[in-house]
Amino acid sequence: MFLKFIRTCFALFLFTLCAAAAHAAGRLPNVVILATGGTIAGTGATSTTTVGYTAAKVGVDDLIKAVPELKQVAHVTGEQVFQIASENMSNEHWLTLAKRVNTLLARPDVDGVVITHGTDTIEETAYFLDLVVKSRKPVVVVGAMRPSTAISADGPINLYNAVLVAGSQEAVGKGVLVVMNDQINAARDVSKTNTTTTDTFKATELGLLGYVVGNQPHFYRASTRKHTVDTEFDVSNLTSLPQVDIAYTYANVGPTAVNALVAAGAKGLIHAGVGDGSLPIKVRPALSAAREKGVIIVRASRVGQGIVARNGEANDDQLDFVVADTLNPQKARILLMLALTKTNDTKEIQRMFYTY
Ligand code: DGL
């Protein structure tokens, strides 16, 4: 028995060595596709159904079979991690996915990972992974705006481009990427900017990182913020994440949402303020009361672009609040959740918002 075990280990070691050598010798990279659902796996009643289809129907093997050209750019294997519409993505899904990605990337025979995902929360999953993946190897999150059954479905070409980038040397060390519509975006700055069109993913002001053109990734910039191997966050031993919620602001808003979220156990609260994160007079007392109860308050903005400046629209030093810098509310929530796994110190948390 022991001899058999030794023989198996030695065979695995040899395979790994060969795979690494093959890759180093310019042979096809080994890319693993982790499928989670979404429109890229969606089906519609007719070939012209581009809304009102069902997401999360097609399995990973069929997604791969639908793009035989993948074999020209990588050795691809697939795993069906979940099969959900991404509006249903949860903290538990994120932890499962992150642990699987880290386990795969720790293997010398895996060169990159692609995650197929619903577009509704791609920007959140991608940023979460950007903060917790512990590898410089490429991780590419990809989706589609048209179901697989539609004429001119964008899924197949998006998947092909994603695998191509995930197997490339150029993408090593660039952080988690979102590749769609022939464009390469950084997880931190990209958002879904249109409800239905295929060009929806943009980093409106901070800009994309590059393109996929002529079967090649072309990078023109890199993120200045820390990610992946340079982050201080580690989810390997976590089974849950601290409860952090978002309170949206608008003209005539009252304290109801803030008070309800705090009463429901929020450990952190993102205030999606108007303008530069302004605090309406009817909400400010509720936020201060929450802070006094130990809830961490982050001032963000519903505007979507620009810096929420510390001590600008509110005296953050006096209120002991944190500001979100350029992170939109949904991404600020992710960073605050991870920050709260390390500290409750608002100075430390503010440092994190200026670092990631
Ligand atoms: N239900 C949405 C989701 O899974 C469909 C949108 C899409 O994947 O493009 O995100």
Image: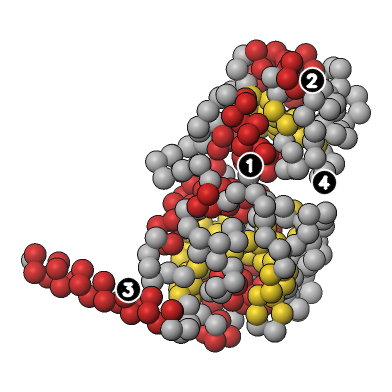
Label 1 neighbour load within 10 Å: few <14, some 14-19, many 20+:
few
Q: How far is the residue under mark 4 from the one under mark 1?
A: 18 Å
Labelled pair 4, 3 in contact (Cβ < 8 Å): no
Q: How far is the residue under mark 3 from the one under mark 2?
A: 56 Å
User: Which circle marks residue 315 in the picture?
Assistant: 2
- Earlier in the chain: of badge 4 and badge 3, it is 3
Q: How far is the residue under mark 2 from the one under mark 4?
A: 21 Å
**Camera-side residue of 66 and 135:** 135
The residue under label 3 is: 16
SS class, disc 3: helix
Q: Quadrant of residue 319?
A: top right
Residue 115 sits above or below residue 242 on the image? below
Instruction: Residue type at mark 4: give it.
Output: Gln
Figure quadrant of the N terminus:
bottom left
SS class, disc 4: loop
Q: How far is the residue under mark 4 from the one under mark 3?
A: 45 Å
Residue 251 in view, yes or no: yes
- Earlier in the chain: of badge 4 and badge 1, it is 4
Q: Quadrant of residue 337?
A: top right
The residue under label 4 is: 305
User: Image point 69% across, 74% down: which residue?
Assistant: 218
User: Which circle marks residue 355 in the picture?
Assistant: 1
**Camera-side residue of 62 and 283:** 283
Labelled pair 1, 2 in contact (Cβ < 8 Å): no
User: Image point 57% across, 24% down: which residue?
Assistant: 345
Q: Is mark 2 within 8 Å of ligand 1?
A: no
**Camera-side residue of 206 and 249:** 206
Residue 37: x and y in percent read 58, 61
Instruction: Residue type at mark 1: give it.
Output: Thr
- Earlier in the chain: of badge 2 and badge 4, it is 4
